Image (tube, coloured by chain):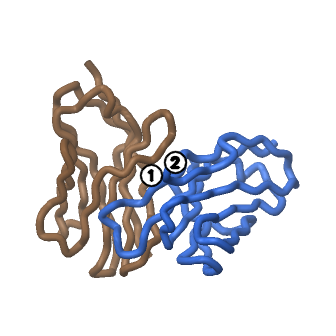
Amino acid sequence: DAGITQSPRYKITETGRQVTLMCHQTWSHSYMFWYRQDLGHGLRLIYYSAAADITDKGEVPDGYVVSRSKTENFPLTLESATRSQTSVYFCASIQWGAPNYGYTFGSGTRLTVV
Amino acid sequence: AQKITQTQPGMFVQEKEAVTLDCTYDTSDQSYGLFWYKQPSSGEMIFLIYQGSYDEQNATEGRYSLNFQKARKSANLVISASQLGDSAMYFCAMTTGGGNKLTFGTGTQLKVEL
């Protein structure tokens, strides 16, 4: 099916380990985003990308790394996971110039750092 | 910097009644976009409705309408004829200045009762 696919859906990792969350979209949308959702904070932007090889920091980028070598993929890496990074992570995309269609979100990855 | 405020952490409504979810925003930009998303207990983010700052008419999508009051900087979501399936978390969000970064409010948990 077309859309945004996130993997894994659930992940448990230990403090200090590196973990990568995957995001793949099939629409060739130019913009892609990573958000984290925590109780009381809504969704907060971690990183975003305007196109392949163009990425920029959002509101809460510390401890995260992104890359975008291909338009369709936007992986998020936690270099050394900490308990404070336990959260639900959402990937999203939108085509530039088409806000009325809304941002499309993946199903989310629930990450637990123990 | 832009900010979204949702002051109702939780709300109850009777089935078939209309309900208004409040959202106020703060930005110095003249060009901005306002969005509402629904997040059911299953966790996915569902796009409901979009309003551009230069749109003269209030946006409507089926049972959803956005009550846009520019001078008051409010963008309330009105759900008509509530259904049990409307029980969910609702997020107001915005983009500003022609950019594409979505800023979210903290959400309102809506419960529809028989």
Question: What residue appears at the point 28 percent right and 60 percent down from the top-left corner?
Answer: B50
Question: What residue appears at the point 77 percent right and 49 percent down from the top-left corner?
Answer: A83
Residue A77 location (% of width, % of height):
75, 61
Residue picked out by circle 2: A40
Quarter of the image with the C terminus of chain A is top right
Q: Are marks 1 and 2 in contact (CB under 8 Å)?
A: yes
Residue A3 badge:
none
Residue furthest left in the image: B57
Q: Tell me, yes or no, if residue A31 can be seen here.
A: yes
Helix or strand or loop: what does disc 1 sit on?
loop
The lab-note entry on whether marks 1 and 2 share a chain reads no
Residue picked out by circle 1: B106
Question: Is residue A51 rendered to the left or right of residue A97?
Answer: right
What colour is chain A? blue
Residue A3 location (% of width, % of height):
50, 53
Circle 1 chain:
B
Question: What residue appears at the point 22 percent right and 25 percent down from the top-left corner?
Answer: B15
Circle 2 chain:
A
What colour is chain B? brown
